[in-house]
Image (spheres, rainbow, N blue to C red):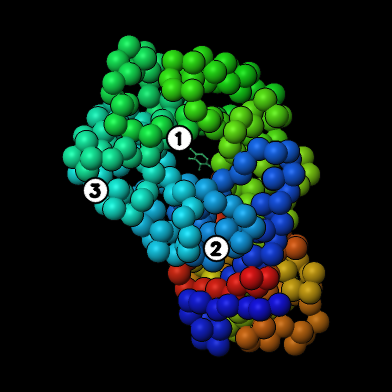
Amino acid sequence: MTSKQTGVAEAIAGAILTIDLAALRENYRILKNRLGGVACAGVVKADGYGLGVDAVANALANEGCDSFFVAQLSEALVLRNALKGHAAIHVLNGLAPGSEIHAAEAEITPVLNCLEQIADWARLAQRLGRRLPAVLQVDSGMSRMGLAPSEVDQLAAEPARLAALDIRLVMSHLACADEPGNDANDLQRASFDHLRTLLPNVKASLANSSGVFLGSEFHYDLARPGAALYGINPTPGTRNPMRPVVRLEAKVVQTREIGDGVGIGYGYASRARATMRLATISLGYADGWHRRAMGSAFFNGNRLPFAGRVSMDSIILDITSLAPGALKPGDLVELIGPNQTIDEVAAHAGTIGYEILTGLGPRFHRRYIGG
Ligand SMILES: *Cc1c(COP(=O)(O)O)cnc(C)c1O
């Protein structure tokens, strides 16, 4: 297995983030399988959900993915440079007024979310004397982004507004895809189907990761998974069908023994109830580990509960259960990995795996394996 290394050098880093590109590619294949013959894009916004957009997008491209979605134009321009070839790169948030020319020059396809974005992109197309590619997003019931039904009616009445554009796709986004029993999913699908009849007859896209698992009626012509590619469970509450992609390990800084009653960490939020052995590790809330996430670390499969509060740059572990001397400075303990999934870490923090992944900090040594 080749291993590419970026970020802080391993010898001097406090923590190591290992990203398994072979598992990422397998997750893409798992989703493709689910989709039957339907095409599958890769959502790589927020630096590939924090894992490094260059490595992630190229791994997906090697798996045959030729359509990518990011949130912002700045991300699209980085991705255009990182990818060889002519993959379609879409900007979900559309283009801020005045930024259109930069998208056109880099052959970026905006997702147009309102009549103003359509007008601005069409005006540029006229000025350049060529039709520009675009995706239309409709709001099928999330109230976040996309053309409102009244705007879709206006477009239907005045199709000339789209004449300068090459509309490639009509899309929408599900608000409750991770709740298969929620009526909102079928209601949004019905609304999407209605709004599509008023627009150019082009390909359609509705499903994010969880949407892929709602059934083939949600698949349309193109799925847009992000989270599931990175190992987050797209079917919360049931077995995770995806392979884990991320492993996070932190180095032990020092170990100590303390006596009964001694305070541990800020505010003495915990105190020893007997003689205890502790290890302090090089990872804290500045690295994206939420201060309120009182989880555990693992060493050779042994659970090492946090003792006291999470600090900015360190966490104290209770290692009393280990044999004395079993854990030494420089040893690595696991924070995310086979013993503790991203989704479990998220549950400790009262959030979702998406926020954990995208919050992982810049001080790690990043090791890419399986590339
Ligand atoms: C982020 C996003 C996706 C990907 O969602 P996941 O839940 O990560 O699969 C798809 N479509 C849109 C519009 C998004 O904003």
- The residue that appears at 66% across and 78% down in the rendered structure is 2
- Above or below, 7 relative to 241: below
Q: What quarter of the picture does the N terminus occupy?
A: bottom right
Q: Tag 2: residue type?
A: Asn
In percent of the image, x 30 and y 15: which residue is there? 158
Q: Mark 2: few, some, or many residues within 10 Å (few <14, many ≥20)? A: some
Nearer-N-terminus badge (3/1):
3
Residue at point 56%, 83% (across, down): 10
CA gap, disc 3 to disc 1?
19 Å
Distance (Cα) linking label 1 and label 2: 23 Å
- Residue 5: x, y in percent? 55, 78
Return the residue at label 1: 168
Secondary structure state at the residue bearing disc 3: helix
Q: Position of residue 123 (x, y in %)?
A: 21, 34
Please state if 344 lies on the left or on the right of 150 as rendered.
right
Type of residue at label 3?
Ile
Q: At label 1, which amino acid type do we have?
A: Arg
Q: Quadrant of residue 243?
A: bottom right
**Does dot 2 land on a helix, a strand or a loop?**
helix
Specify whether residue 307 is in view. no
Pointer 1 local density, CA inside 10 Å: few below 14, some 14–19, many at least 20: some
Taking the spot 79% from the left edge, 70% from the top edge, the residue there is: 302
Residue 330, quarter of the rendered image:
bottom right
Sequence order check: which comes first, mark 3 or mark 2? 2
Tell me where residue 32 sits by quadrant: top right
Front one among 147 and 51: 147
Report the residue marked by disc 2. Answer: 58
Which residue is denoted by mark 3 in the rendering? 101
